[in-house]
Image (cartoon, rainbow, N blue to C red):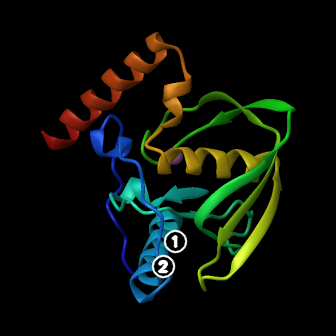
Amino acid sequence: MAILPILCYPDPRLHTVAQPVNAVDERVRTLVQDMLDTMYDAHGIGLAATQVDVHQRVIVIDVSEERNRPLVLINPEIVWASAEMRVGDEGCLSVPGIYDGVERAAQVRVRALDAQGEPQTIEAEEILAVCIQHEMDHLLGKVFVEYLSPLKRSRIRSKMLKRQREERA
Ligand code: NI
């Protein structure tokens, strides 16, 4: 079990575009386990490898109440998204304490490899659809605050930098 450090916005490494995983080997399985440990430890519902400074297309999610239904998405691709959009409040382990509304497709169908390297297709709606789209953005180097107005974003940026200075002091 390993808890990995989570990058905090506005760390420029959060804008790195992740590369596809070539093979789901022991190294990737260890990464997945460490990411699950890190997500559960931080009480998050999703974590992208980008957030732990590993730039590979790996996501872990658990939106269950009981925190016992881990979902692992390796090389995820959205193969279908509903035309219907929905605005939901989002937060992020890389932007602690900030929650704001983001418009996303209400439903998505995602194809990905699971932790064993087997292909899986997931039909997602509600919070799972939001979470998948949010985490997939991380793999493209995008943080949810980038959907907010420039004013809000700059306020969040200042707040985060101030907090990081205080933590270092
Ligand atoms: Ni996030």
Q: Name the residue located 60 percent from the left edge and 44 percent from the top edge.
A: 134
Could you say whether the residue bearing mark 2 is in a helix, strand or loop?
helix
Q: Nearer the viewer, residue 30 or 24?
A: 24
Q: Position of residue 57 (x, y in %)?
A: 49, 62
User: How many numbered discs?
Assistant: 2
As drawn, the residue found furthest toward the top would be 151
Q: Amino acid at mark 2?
A: Gln
Q: Position of residue 35 (x, y in %)?
A: 46, 69
As drawn, the residue found furthest toward the bottom would be 26
Could you say whether the residue bearing mark 1 is in a helix, strand or loop?
helix
* Image quadrant where one finds the N terminus: bottom left
Q: Name the residue located 52 percent from the left edge and 71 percent from the top edge.
A: 36
Disc 1, ligand 1: is the CB inside 8 Å?
A: no
Q: Amino acid at mark 1?
A: Leu
The residue carrying pointer 1 sits among few (fewer than 14), some (14 to 19) or many (20 or more) residues within 10 Å by Cα, namely many
According to the picture, the residue beneath numbered tag 1 turns out to be 36
Disc 2, ligand 1: is the CB inside 8 Å?
A: no
Q: Looking at the rendering, which quadrant does residue 141 occupy?
A: top left
Of the numbered discs in the image, which one, if any, rests on residue 33? 2
Q: Are circles 2 and 1 on residues that touch, CB within 8 Å? A: yes
The residue carrying pointer 2 sits among few (fewer than 14), some (14 to 19) or many (20 or more) residues within 10 Å by Cα, namely some
Q: Name the residue located 80 percent from the left edge and 49 percent from the top edge.
A: 80
* Image quadrant where one finds the C terminus: top left
Residue 51 located left or right of residue 114: left
Q: Name the residue located 81 percent from the left edge and 31 percent from the top edge.
A: 85
Q: Nearer the viewer, residue 136 or 86?
A: 136
Q: Position of residue 61 (x, y in %)?
A: 62, 62
